[in-house]
Amino acid sequence: MLEKLSLNIENVTPTGRPLTSHRYSAILPMVPGLAEKSGEEFVELLKVCILEAKLTAVAEVDAAFQPYGMSAIVVLQESHVAAHCWPEINKVLVDVHICDYFSDNLAKAETLCRALGTALSADASLERWHYARIDEKTVRIED
């Protein structure tokens, strides 16, 4: 028999920090050869960037599309990274969502975006990325 569970959830982590998320999105030109990678290789490329940012991957999935294209999602202890390739237009769309729980992870999110930009597009700048900081009461969008 299932019991009904009542929770009193506040927007504060066990460390007393407010729960905040850092979201980055970009549509980038693809580096040569990216479209030829297998889904597994694509995931591994994302995981190398995740390690560079000192974040923790916990699960992943990839999908290939016919006649072309692929997507990969890596679930992080801190949230997730999703990337979608469109070889027919030479673009890759990347979404990064990193939560603050035990510490402020903005610097790690920025490091991850720079690493992904380099690996997927040969561009480590954040100029093409759109940023939003989200907490329970506010959304701040920066371009």
Image (cartoon, grey):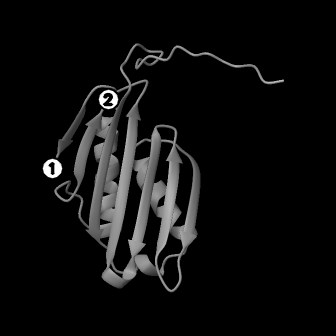
User: Residue drawn at (23%, 64%), measured in percent from left and top?
Assistant: 123
Residue 14 position within the rendered picture, expressed as x and y whole percent measured from the top left: 48, 15
Q: Quadrant of residue 102?
A: top left
Q: Name the residue under label 2.
A: 135
Is the residue marked by circle 1 packed among few (<14), some (14-19), or many (20+) residues within 10 Å? few
As displayed, is residue 129 above or below residue 32? above
Residue 126 position within the rendered picture, expressed as x and y whole percent measured from the top left: 20, 54
Instruction: Point out the tag, 1 or 2, that comes first from the N-terminus.
Output: 2
Residue 143 - label: 1
Q: Is residue 131 left or right of residue 102?
A: left
Is the residue marked by circle 2 packed among few (<14), some (14-19), or many (20+) residues within 10 Å? some
Q: Is residue 9 left or right of residue 2?
A: left
The residue nearer to you, when weighing 18 against 104, is: 18
Q: Quadrant of residue 140?
A: top left
Q: Residue furthest right?
A: 1
As displayed, is residue 61 above or below residue 66? above
Residue 94 position within the rendered picture, expressed as x and y whole percent measured from the top left: 36, 59
Residue type pointed to by label 2: Asp
Q: Is residue 21 left or right of residue 72?
A: left
Q: Is residue 81 left or right of residue 25?
A: right
